[in-house]
Amino acid sequence: LALYLLHRGYGPRIALAVEQMFAFERRGTVWTNTGRAPQAW
């Protein structure tokens, strides 16, 4: 649910960065190159 909310609120780039940070892969997701770009902490 959290990744869905990130995707809707901040865009797919942020959601993808969080997926990679937690080594998680969502299934059946169509990725688009839109939204905010992730920034390093």
Image (cartoon, helix red, strand yellow):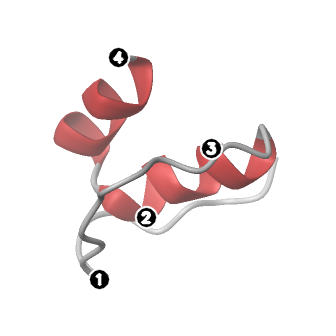
- Separation of residues labelled 1 and 3 (CA atoms): 15 Å
Amino acid type, callout 2: Arg
Residue 30 location in percent, x, y?
Answer: 24, 69
* Rendering quarter of residue 7: top left
Question: Which residue extends farthest bottom?
Answer: 33
Q: Nearer the viewer, mark 4 or mark 2?
A: 4
Residue under the image location 62 percent in, 44 percent down: 18
Proximity of marks 2 and 1: CB atoms separated by less than 8 Å: yes
Mark 3–mark 4 contact, CB under 8 Å?
Answer: no
**Mark in the foreground, 4 or 1:** 4
| Label located before the other in sequence (1 or 3) | 3
Residue that label 2 marks: 13
**Residue annotated with mark 4:** 1
Alpha carbon distance from label 3 to label 4: 13 Å
Tell me, yes or no, whether the two marked residues, 3 and 2, touch with CB atoms within 8 Å: no
Q: Residues within 10 Å of mark 1 (few under 14, many from 20)?
A: few
Q: Dot 3 surroundings within 10 Å: few (below 14), some, or many (20 or more)?
A: some
Count of picture labels: 4
Instruction: Measure the C-alpha gap from mark 3 to mark 2.
Output: 9 Å
Cα distance, mark 4 to mark 2?
Answer: 16 Å
Q: CA distance from mark 4 to mark 1?
A: 21 Å
Picture residue at 61% right of the left edge, 56% below the top: 17
The amino acid on which the numbered mark 1 sits, given as a three-letter code, is Asn
17 up-or-down from 13: above or below = above
Q: Is residue 6 positioned above or below 26 on the image?
A: above
Image disc number at residue 18:
3
Q: Are marks 4 and 2 in contact (CB under 8 Å)?
A: no
Q: Secondary structure at mark 1?
A: loop
**Of helix, strand and loop, which one carries label 2?**
helix
